[in-house]
Amino acid sequence: MIDAASETAAPTDAHASVHAPAATETAETPQDRLARAKEASRATARLTSHDKAHALEAIAQALEANAAVIIAANALDIERGRESGIGEGLIDRLRLDEKRVAALASAVRDVAGLADPVGQVVGGHRMPNGVTLEQVRVPFGVVGVIYEARPNVTVDIAALALRSGNASVLRGGSAARESNTVLVRVMRDALEGAGVTPEAIQTVDDFGRDGAKALMRGRGFVDVLVPRGSASLIETVVTESIVPVIETGAGNVHIVLDESAPDDWAREIVVNAKVQRPSVCNAVETVLVLRQAAPRLVPMIASALQSEGVAIHGDDMVAGMVAGVIPATEEDWATEYLSLDIAMKVVDTLDDALAHIRRYSTGHTESIVTTDTRNAERFLAEVDSAVVMANASTRFTDGGEFGFGAEVGISTQKLHTRGPMGLAELTSTKWLARGSGQTRA
């Protein structure tokens, strides 16, 4: 079931001050909202780059002006989340404070400042008969997103969709219900004030699971659907949708430390990749240490992690070198912890490390720490994940860090895109043919 764990009772009167009726709450069915989004997508596709940038600036200003209301709504979500025991990882993803609201507004401005992909010429040529062909980028139309406990996604998706000429339909789940209600209302009001149809941003949150089902079955209205969240949510959307889906994947992320890994690089990269924000999909979950480097690196890395409160789930070799290690099970190698837990294993060779990654990786991000150029290049060439790194923290797998302003998600599939998804990934193409009376013989 979609977001089953976070579906809770309707808000009480105590929520009324922040859970004010949104402009979208007049529709009788989720299909009505999908239809309005489809109609709005025709208008957003015609907006000029200046129009879209102006609308996004209006959204950024509105987020800043309404920060106190947004944070108050978020506090209700946090309180309800703690009462229902959703876990600290999801609480961290759910939380909005002054700094994070300011970051949302900044991300919207970053998106506004990016080059507009619509109309970009991808390719083309002149046919022998004189007809000229151009392949240009065009919006998808309606982008649907199903996600959970991530109110930042509400803003990121709406901004990216608008900049790329699309309308968006959002299903953010009940864990962030209060936050998302206010965020959608603020953005829709900002669009209206900027002269852009507010119907370009829709939510089906108030329909619960029926809203999610409508998105998954919105053929003819929804042009592409992106799930973001737990492995079970993504699997449900992928298997039950009859509209095209871009699969974003869970992050069972690996870092390999070989014999040449410098102490400081190994320590700083692993600790950053695990501790800087453990609840996100690009945080490292498993560290593989080559046997010749293990006596030097394992105790040092383990000590650095434990001093940050990280619980180490290790194999027998790791347990023999480090006190307080939790014996690793088969399940640990396949687990995306999203917490201050990490699995650590000693492997004989780089071949063994690559074989382990092939077996357990979710295809998100992997990194190697090494000064051996041959090992680095082999790792970059052979590992089949969306992002493969040498000597860098896996936390860099992010649309904002990659220069996209924000991201739709991180695609772990190979069609239509792979890796962090920005503006270009929210477009398709069409061919434009210009002739002067030519006919085919």
Image (cartoon, helix red, strand yellow):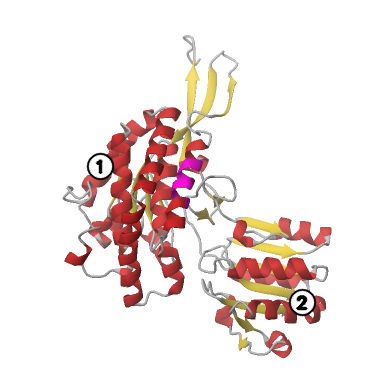
- Vertical relation: 415 (above or below) 366: above
**In the image, farthest residue toward the top:** 437
Q: Which residue is mark 1?
A: 35
Q: Residues within 10 Å of mark 2 (few under 14, many from 20)?
A: many
Residue range (magenta): 103-110
Q: Residue at x 42, y 53 (%)?
A: 101
Q: What is the magenta segment's predominant secondary structure?
A: helix
In terms of secondary structure, where does tag 2 sit? helix
The answer to whether residue 197 of the structure is visible from this angle is no
Q: Residues within 10 Å of mark 1 (few under 14, many from 20)?
A: some
Q: Residue at x 49, y 16 (%)?
A: 434
Q: Residue at x 33, y 33 (%)?
A: 194
In terms of secondary structure, where does tag 1 sit? helix
Q: Which mark is residue 297?
A: 2
Residue 128 image offset from top left, x and y in percent? 60, 16
- Vertical relation: 140 (above or below) 352: above
Amino acid type assigned to the residue bearing label 2 in the image: Leu
Residue 283 image offset from top left, x and y in percent? 58, 66
Q: Is residue 272 left or right of residue 210?
A: right
The image quadrant where one finds the N terminus is: bottom left
Q: Residue at x 35, y 75 (%)?
A: 82
Q: Earlier in the sequence, mark 1 or mark 2?
A: 1
44 and 332: which is toward the camera: 44
